[in-house]
Image (cartoon, helix red, strand yellow):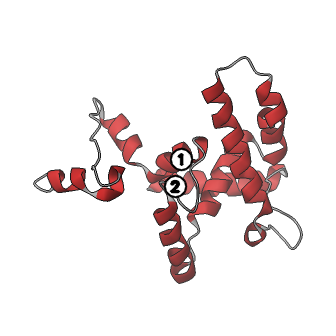
Amino acid sequence: MRHAGECIRHSQLCGSGGGVIVPSFSNSRCRKMSDLSHLEEIAIMFGDDNKTGMFAQWRAFQEMAKDGWGYDGKKRQCVKTLCKYGGYKQAARKLHPDKVQNMDIDEEEKQVLINVMSFLNQCKAEQAYEVSPGQPLTLNDPVERETLCKTVREQESSA
């Protein structure tokens, strides 16, 4: 707590002007807003740029960790998002930009859905995430999906 003032002024929060602390009225909400996985979901929904966006430095660190420890945070986020939508095919049915544009929701919500689909397209295109040579990570196969989704759920419950 004694360094909170320094953290608020830290340039990584909101540029050179510092940042804000958002009060939380429940332990579960505080825990969720402190959960990196949740924050990455938010970054994906709002179309955070991997090179210059809010999570650019975090992604760079994850690349170093992947090389050193074999942990790939982006792949985990890909699997988690694919699990949420029941695989790539189901996600595409729900999130295809043409379909989203015809939904009766506000423009901000439409953009969130389009950003999620864009992220899943990146996941599918990533050769390093291929399940086998030439077979992209889609989790369309129910057995494969259940196996990987179960692993992600177990990792999150133990964290």
Q: From mark 1 to mark 2, how far is it between C-alphas?
A: 9 Å
Screen quadrant of the C terminus: bottom left
Residue at left offset 72%, top offset 40%: 85
Image location (x, y in percent) of residue 81: 66, 47
Nearer-the-camera pick, 90 or 116 = 116
Nearer-the-camera pick, 28 or 14 = 14
Residue at left offset 74%, top offset 67%: 129
Residue 65's disc is none
Disc 2 crowd, CA 10 A, few/some/many (<14, 14-19, 20+): few
Residue 53's disc is 2
Q: Indicate which label's residue lies in the foreground, 1 or 2.
A: 2
Asked which quadrant contains residue 113, the reply is top right
Image location (x, y in percent) of residue 18: 27, 50
Q: Secondary structure at mark 2?
A: loop
Q: Is residue 12 left or right of residue 79?
A: left
Q: Earlier in the sequence, mark 1 or mark 2?
A: 1
Q: Are marks 1 and 2 in contact (CB under 8 Å)?
A: yes
Which residue position is annotated with label 1? 43
Instruction: Give the amino acid at mark 1.
Output: Ala
Disc 1 crowd, CA 10 A, few/some/many (<14, 14-19, 20+): some
Image location (x, y in percent) of residue 14: 35, 49
Q: In the orientation shown, which residue stands out farthest toward the left? A: 2
Question: In the displayed structure, would residue 27 be above or below residue 52?
Answer: above
Question: In the displayed structure, would residue 148 be above or below residue 111?
Answer: below
Q: In the orientation shown, which residue stands out farthest toward the top? A: 104
Nearer-the-camera pick, 33 or 142 = 33
Image location (x, y in percent) of residue 131: 80, 67
Instruction: Give the amino acid at mark 2.
Output: Gly
Residue at left offset 56%, top offset 81%: 67
